[in-house]
Amino acid sequence: MTGKRLWIGVDIGGTAIKAGVVDEAGHIVEKREVPTATHEGPDRVLERLVELITQLKAVAETSGAVVGGVGVGVPGPDLDVERGVVIRAVNLGWKNVPLRDRLIAGLPGLPVSVNNDANLAALGEAWVGGGKGAQHLLLITVGTGVGGGVIIGGRVYPGADSLAGEIGHVTVRPEGGHRCNCGKTGCLETEASATAIIREAREAARSGRSPHLAGILARNGVLTARDVVEAAQAGDEVAQALFAYAGRVLGLALANAANLLNPERIVVGGGVSHAGELLFVPLQEAYRAHALPAVAKRPVVPAELGNDAGLIGAARLAMQQASPDA
């Protein structure tokens, strides 16, 4: 026996469960993915999850290593972190699922920790990604929605109700905003997510303001965020303006959050971040304009871990639960 300790991280998504074995340097040494198959119900999903973790544990142990624990990321903010209960996960169709207890029952001897997936993405990026070396970090993910996570002292800051970091629901348009899935209007998520950009691009195509986007919509029947990026890169002014606006409101929201939290670094991830300078240039400009001078000097950087951020962060959570000084 080598005595080497490894950790298992799990990222439960609406369509796939990603899980991997991670070493103490943050490297993934084994990774697997299975369909979530939410239509089968939470009981079957949890059975599949236990099977997957058991397989990864066996792989880790063939090298003589010891698995120290399991961390699990769950989508959505309605989570009782202390008890490991998923109160509500819309993407999974779960309600009041005792995730941690069910996993502990199926994985005897393995400690299990549970947290929000965006928080764990932040933890992963702070550990070995775009925020490596930062003890205080803010992560924002801009994809179908807008999520976020806060790291203070190298650990996830949950807030009183495990809702800290929900920057997607900061109000950036107090009047006349679109209704958000959370029930409010004018949330950042309704103004700067991929969903918002596509909504406005579709309107521009149908109204004739963008012949370029109208042509794509006519050919394909739908518009995607990638279509809008390519239109902007090809010089379409409407598409460029959509990313400029999204960048400005994201920069404003990040400046306000940074003025409050004063993180060492802000990390921006998610599919929309792949738009590159189309998004980052207006975002950086707005951030510097609205942040306090000292705060504005702190860098805003792209995420580096991609789809592995949540998995790596989940493994880091397990490590920290087992070793308070980790």
Image (cartoon, helix red, strand yellow):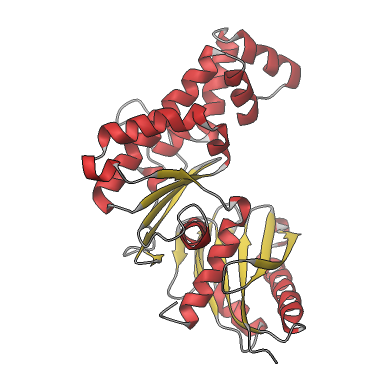
Residue at left offset 74%, top offset 21% = 220
Quick check: can you spot residue 232? yes
Residue at left offset 72%, top offset 21% = 221
- The residue closer to the viewer here, 64 or 252, is 64
Q: Within the image, what quadrant is residue 103 found in?
A: bottom right
Q: Position of residue 115 (x, y in %)?
A: 49, 66
Q: In this view, does 64 lie to the left or right of 80?
A: right
Q: The N terminus is located in which quarter?
A: bottom right
Q: Position of residue 105 (x, y in %)?
A: 63, 84
Q: Is residue 122 above or below residue 194?
A: below
Residue at left offset 28%, top offset 53% = 261
Count all numbered tags in the image, as a single digit.
0
Quick check: can you spot residue 171? no
Q: Where is residue 314 in the image (x, y as percent from the top left)?
A: 55, 67
- The residue closer to the viewer here, 245 or 3, is 3
Q: Is residue 231 left or right of residue 316?
A: right
Q: The C terminus is located in which quarter?
A: bottom left
Q: Within the image, what quadrant is residue 246 found in?
A: top left
Q: In this view, does 307 lie above or below 201?
A: below
Q: In this view, does 24 lie to the left or right of 61?
A: left
Q: Where is residue 322 in the image (x, y as percent from the top left)?
A: 49, 82
